[in-house]
Image (spheres, rainbow, N blue to C red):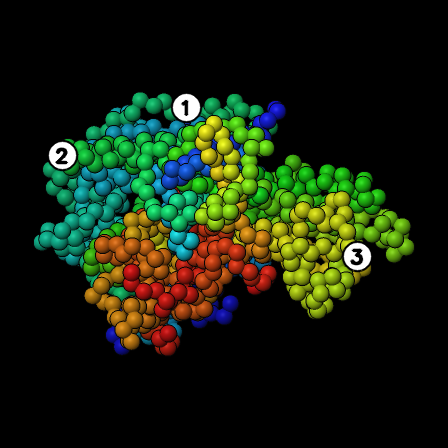
Amino acid sequence: MATAELLLVDDSKVMREMIAACLRPEQGLAFSHAGSGLEAIERLSLKKFDLVILDLNMPDIGGIEVVEFIRAQDRLRELPILIVTTRGDDTSRSRALGAGASRFMTKPFAPEALLGEVRALLRRDTRAVS
Amino acid sequence: MTSPFDVREFLAGFLAEAEEHLRSSAQNLMALDRSFAQGQSNARAVRDLFRSLHTVKGLSAMVGAEPIVDLAHAMETVLRSADRAPGTLRREALEPMLQALRAIEERVSALAEGKTLAPAPAAILDALGALQPQDGQGGARPDAAVSLPPEVLAKLSAAEKQQLVEGVAAGKRALRADFVPTPERAAAGLTISSVRERVSNVAEIVKVLPLSRPRSEEAPGGLAFVLVLLTGGSDEAIAEAAGIPKEEVLPVAVQSAPQPAPAFGEEDEIPAEAVQRRTIRVEVGRLDDALERLSALVVTRFRLSRALAALGARGADTREVAEIMAENGRQLRDLRAAIMRARMVPVSELLERLPLVVRGITRTSGKKARVEIDGGGGAGDGQTPEGRSIGGAGFAGVASRAGQEGRSIGEELDKSVADRIFPALVHLVRNAVDHAIEPPDERARLGKPEEAVIRVSCLERSNRQLELTVSDDGRGVDATRLARKAGREVPATDAALLDLLTIRGLSSRDEATTTSGRGMGMDIVKRIVDQLGGELLLKTQRGSGSTFTLRVPLSITIVDAFSFACGKQPFVVPVATIEEIVEVDPGRLVRAPGGREVRLLQRRGETVPLLALESVLHMERGTEPRRKALIVRRNAEPYGFEVDRMLGQQEVVVRPLEDPLVHVPGVTGSTDLGDGLPTLVLDLLSLTGSLGESRPS
Amino acid sequence: MTGSGDLHVVFKVADAEYALRASDVLHMESYTGATKVPGTAPYVAGLVQIRGRVVPVVDVRARFGLAPAPLTLDSRVVVAQANDRTVGLLVDSAREVLRIPQEEFKTPPEVVSRETQGFVKAVAQSQKRLVLLLDFGKVIGEEPSLPASPVAKAGRPEHAIGEVTANGQ
């Protein structure tokens, strides 16, 4: 199984570490970290990733704008984007999905839930195709 | 929670970050205090505070520090409103915010020492809750003309433009510097983060924006970052910090529009008592009138935009006007939302009329009864329920605020919903007096108080339904008698009994009484609730009494919705029903075996059947290639609906389509996207039933 | 207020003149198109928004089984009420309000009733014109039946009007 490159984007370092820890049970994952939306966009322009995990609440350029920017690029159209964000107002989910995010989760979340979402987005889950 | 990681592993990291956020928040609150004193607003401090508290909330949630979550959330809610409407944060807000911050600090320390956390003090949460809603005074948004490319300009917020204006007015220069990331630069330590930090040492960064560039040798990532700056220093310093040649540091012209921003400090003149909500009575007809005039405005705007398109087709440069038109469109939409909001009536107004109704009937019937109103509120008294942002722009669905006596009975409904629900409530209450409540002497014999109590309560359920209950302590419903009268079997359950009760034309009295039994029947009550998309429930006990519950989904009043075009017609669908929106690449579709007109989309290991929505809706087949598909999930199965293109997302007021002529499956109501024309609100989940039945037209 | 119950709004559909009691009519508006609602009867033109209210519109020509005609500047939507319902009628033109006392309305001759499928409940002579009193309820499909099941239960196809369904499911 090829190593999947994950980009974790959150301005909180401890949050990124928690996310990585939740995903420990899954083999073959490599993590890159970005502490801001700008860094994330920069990384994405210079390297190929298989999944982006993104917080919405970040300085300078918020998560929604990052999603919009990503989706505006042809080569990143299909890149799975998992939003993991603090629950806020009710419009965050709609704005995120409307911008093209693939899945949306709020903190707090159970580690298994995050693991499940990541597996699904990387197409590594073994659920029967319906 | 059972987790592969131990939260204690992250406690140190959490504490470090939390303490940093608390420190900067304290500084921001001090900065706000100084700004207040000088009569200025400080949008940046508000924004930074909001973000910090939001982050603290998320981190605390992850480590299970609930009391901190509650405090952070309460602060965040106040700041969110203030962030959206600059200038609406009052000086009185500072004290409760400081107290809340101190309360958070205490609990963070407690966490560090391994002690259990005290719950968030109710007094502080109440004080923060009482700060909403804000009146949108002060804080006008002066507009500015800034010479930046349109894609960059579009992303500057009003506050950032204001920052530029103020900076230039104070004698600074506005500049633009572009940074292009490359692997070589990254290897040399020149990343956007490091550049940003270095530049911020020599200039004030207003905004950093990513911009797509075609891929080239100079821009291998297809990306450039535009830094919009204010500086009193030299171009050389900036160029050096950014690692770019001096010539590439460009000036930005900033001109403010002549709009005076009222000084923030004017709000100090308003006495504290006036913070109470002020109301006036408005005839609904006047609001309808206003809506109609708005429609005329929208029509004019359409004509303007067509004329503009014609001009553009003849080669004129219409970009600036197009921007103005876009702003105008937004303003019209906001105005419509504001008028619709004005149609909201508090539920308490409905309920307050009921005791009068009862007084009227008890006099004629000789029974003794009174109505008691319980305004429940919702998630918990004294706390700001999550998910309800009040006072900020646009969200009018459920507003909970302290009522006069301090109870939270502030739920609101659209007037048309309220108008329909009220007769149902009246009937239930009358019914109770008429059928359920025993005459005083009988009650005395039964050991019940002579005066019966009919309890009416309202509370908001967590999934944004309004639940109204009408309870009495009377006889309960006589199932046997009812069954005999209807010629049916005696119902075994309360649910079956309710079905019997709501059969049209049935009255459980042998002759119609003067008040009920004729006219409005229980069947109409059921129909009203059904049409609103709600539920009617009954619990009854012979001898003890009955409770009728009406659940009305508030989400039918206002929903968060995606709008999209299908066959040139706009439609709307509630966001909550959509799992995902995907691009449809025709090359990647597979036709279902058996030659049926259903195509399949492979999506992350799942096969999703795709339906062309225009076929499902029996519309004419459009000529545009369908680019997007909306994925819904029913019974754990995914289904996709192809549409032409997405138009956007917004909160919309949904009017249920009640008339039988237009009451069809798949359409839950109509809304107005701001053009004055009814736009259909679709229920894609119910349309999935037509999979396999649609044929190409 | 004597005789105010005698006021009738008169409108034209395919050269015949029809009347509705003025007290039942809420508005008369020009017609610029309606939002079509899929799955409705063919004579339902769709939804319009009038004075802040969303109203379904019945194309009267279609309802009467007549050939469709192009819209003109005279086309009107006559919005009227019956019981709880507010519905608009799309007609060729609507210009007048006439006083027609109650006594003047006679039962229509059988051939008229038949030809108009029961949509006409009375006829009157007003200054040499024949005016047909419309049975509004009939036109909008008012039938004494149980209410249709609510929308958005698992998509069983339903007819919009008059289907008898069991309550609760």
Amino acid marked by disc 2: Arg
On the image, the x and y values in percent for residue B515 come to 74, 44
Please indicate, yes or no, whether residue B654 appears anywhere in the rendered image. no
Local packing at callout 1 (Cα closer than 10 Å; few below 14, some 14-19, many 20+) is some
Q: Residue at x 50, y 32 (%)?
A: C125
| Residue nearest the observer in this picture, B346 or B288 | B288
| Residue B475, numbered label | 3
Q: Which residue is drawn at 74% across and 56% down?
A: B508
Q: In this view, does A125 lie to the left or right of B249?
A: right
Q: What element carries label 1?
A: loop
Please tell me which of labels 1 and 3 falls first in the chain: 1
Q: What element carries label 2?
A: loop
What subunit carries mark 3? B
Please tell me which of labels 2 and 3 falls first in the chain: 2
What subunit carries mark 1? B
Are the residues under badges 1 and 2 in a single subunit? Answer: yes
Q: Quadrant of the C terminus of chain A?
A: bottom left
Location of mark 2 (residue):
B314
Q: Is residue A77 left or right of residue B26?
A: left
What subunit carries mark 2? B
Q: Which residue is drawn at 51% across and 47% down?
A: C110
| Viewer-side label of 1, 2 | 2
On the image, the x and y values in percent for residue B309 come to 21, 36
Quadrant in the picture for residue C13:
top left
